[in-house]
Amino acid sequence: MIPTRANGQLAFAHYARDPDEEIFRAHGMTVLTLRGDRIGELTAFLAPEIPERFGLPGSYSGSSRTSK
């Protein structure tokens, strides 16, 4: 997940690992609607082209990921 903003609200672009490559591809975005200091609503957009519309990468390498 990569944090971002959408329509002035907190949002997260989510990525899924491509099973055939060491790469993570865009999967969609979730926008949080806050009510005070709580999350009042989550809206998920499950379309891989959404993160790129917000200037985020369509994919990224998994090589910088830390393993546990």
Image (spheres, rainbow, N blue to C red):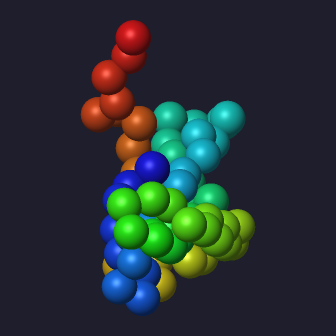
Q: In which quarter of the image is residue 3?
A: bottom left
Q: Which residue is drawn at 38% across and 16% down?
A: 67
The residue positioned 37% from the left and 61% from the top of the image is 37
Q: Position of residue 24 (x, y in %)?
A: 51, 46
Image location of residue 31, percent across then percent down: 52, 70
**Which one is in front, 26 or 2?**
2
Q: Quadrant of residue 18?
A: top right
Relative to 68, say whether 43 is above or below: below
Q: Outermost residue toward the bottom? A: 7
Residue drawn at 67 percent across, 35 percent down: 19
Of residues 38 and 60, the one nearer the viewer is 38
Q: Nearer the viewer, residue 66 or 38?
A: 38
Q: In this view, does 5 lie to the left or right of 33?
A: left
Asked if residue 45 shows in the view, the reply is: yes
Number of numbered callouts drawn: 0
Vertical comparison of 37 with 67: above or below: below
- The structure residue drawn at horizontal position 38% and vertical position 55%, both measured from the top left corner, is 2
Split into 4 quadrants, where in the image is the C terminus? Answer: top left
In this rendered view, identify the residue nearer to me: 44 or 24: 44
User: Which residue is at the far top?
Assistant: 68
Task: Residue 57: tell me if it is visible.
Answer: no
Q: State left or right for residue 15 relative to residue 48.
A: left
Coordinates of residue 40 in the picture (x, y in percent): 56, 66
Quick check: 19 above or below 25? above
